[in-house]
Image (tube, rainbow, N blue to C red):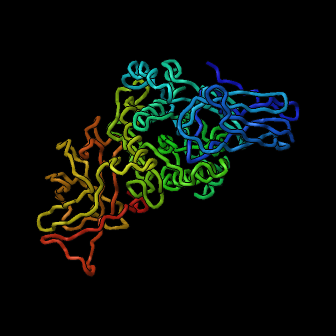
Amino acid sequence: MAAWVLLALAPVAAGAMFGFASYYGDHMVLQKEPAGAVVWGYGEPGATVTVVLSGAGGLVVMKKTARVKGPSGTWTTVLDPMDQGGPYALTARQGSENVTLRDVYFGDVWLCSGQSNMAMTVLQIANASQELAAAARYPYVRVFAAAPARSNVELDDLERIDLPWSIPTAENLGHGNFTYFSAVCWLLGRYLYEALRYPLGLVEAAWGGTPIEAWSSPRALRACGLLGDVESISLQQQLSGPQTPSVLWNAMIHPLLNMTLRGVAWYQGEANAFLHTDRYNCTFPALIADWRQAFHAGSVGQTELLLPFGFVQLSTYRQQGPADSFARLRWHQTADLGVVPNARMPGTFMAVAMDLGDERSPYGSVHPRDKQNVAHRLQLGARAVAYGEKNVIFQGPYPTRAVLEVTRGLLNITYSQELVWRRRDMRAFEVCCSSPPSPCGWLPAPVVAVESRRVTLALAGCGGLVLALRYAWAEWPCDYQSCVLYNSWGLPAPPFLLDALAAGETPGRSQPAGGREMLLLPGSWFSRGI
């Protein structure tokens, strides 16, 4: 189906149509309380627009008025916070003209963005026929998809829509390959609905083969030393989508800023394994901070300033891949701190996906078909971080302490959670024994024992000098669901790169018997030529 052309974008001075902006329509979900939903549209400059929300039998629930601003010819109002539920009718009147949207619900609205792994549709994933058949059971999870578009200037509204607000069906969830509707977005919304039991609105804005620079505003790019102009980005032939800085921000994100949101889900990064990989530890946190500020301002403060932001850590690409750009990108996705939320990325949550590789995927191994586990891990993070569920475990085990037993050649690593040792024949840990400024000489450190929360590594060939430690540092770290370490809930331990420094004689700290405690700090080996 061709993208819907939005006639409401005709110049107002030429007698533009009166009505709502592009992403309001029948079957839509508006953000529920405690926020107020922003509603806007087009009209005759200087005219007064009356917006009426009505319930069953036409009972008026709320009435708002707004003046159409010139020369933009737009009007905006903020609805009073509404409880979850519906259906409602939303009517805008200007003089004798009126437009009514029907079957409107209030719930939570999530924006889903990124590149091709976000754009993969339900038709393309594992158990697709079952997932498509299940669509009819979720009529209160509504879907909307912006059409891929680029612009050299910031647009106030979407130019085209692939899927207007719709009740989910097998056809609109699986329209084709990399079109609509996003499988990760749909499954995230479906799983959240099963936990929350109220309406969810899902907004897809994704384009395959696109780097983060295209989704970033000039303001965000300047924060990372990128000027936001064409010359600042060296184009990469292996990327299929637009690469010019800010062109997708301009056409696909900026138009949505007036929308009141509950959260964002992001699946992007593969393109930046080939482009400005080692700037991602700046460009990604900068994009998050910038989107938050922009959506907060665009919604007149209704979208919270610390908008929950979830993302998928990169999965896999090639078996035996010689490069480590995917491993570096995974690390940079956490702002080089290993886990989120953290000080540089507050209010975020991450789904680890490095154990979901799919070498036989008909869409290429960079597009794994298991999106169910991706969405499951994302919704755990959303429930813990966005919804504040205290007892939800949403991330795998991470190192907290290390003790070096020099005489026995062992390194004991303490983890934050109970461990499940799933693969005993893999060499996932490596240690660096070199002295800076020499490049790091990484040596395998076999696992010799896994106890409740402790892993013991053998340091053959490293002696008593351990300068850094890394885990799962590969383009394809393990086979499907077969990495070395998980927790009791089946969540994989995330990859890491840590400097291992002697703790020294700290007042009040006693060294463990028979060993020397090491401080595990986020790794800084990129500047030393790893």
Q: Position of residue 5 (x, y in %)?
A: 71, 25
Which quarter of the picture shows residue 398?
Answer: bottom left
Which quarter of the picture shows residue 98?
Answer: top right
Question: Vertical placement of 18 versus 1: above or below?
Answer: below
The residue closer to the viewer here, 326 or 13, is 13
The residue closer to the viewer here, 464 or 49, is 49
State the residue lying farthest toward the bottom.
507
The residue sitting at 38% across, 55% down in the picture is 338
Q: Position of residue 211 (x, y in %)?
A: 55, 42
Quadrant position of the N terminus in the picture: top right
Q: Is residue 434 left or right of residue 22?
A: left
Q: Is residue 11 left or right of residue 269?
A: right
The residue sitting at 43% across, 58% down in the picture is 342
Q: Position of residue 217 (x, y in %)?
A: 64, 49
The residue closer to the viewer here, 409 or 155, is 155
The residue sitting at 50% across, 42% down in the picture is 266
Q: Is residue 148 left or right of residue 357?
A: right
The residue sitting at 46% across, 48% down in the picture is 386
Q: Position of residue 439 (x, y in %)?
A: 36, 60
Numbered-mark total:
0
Residue 28 shows up from this direction: yes
Quadrant position of the C terminus in the picture: bottom left
Question: Vertical placement of 399 versus 310: above or below?
Answer: below
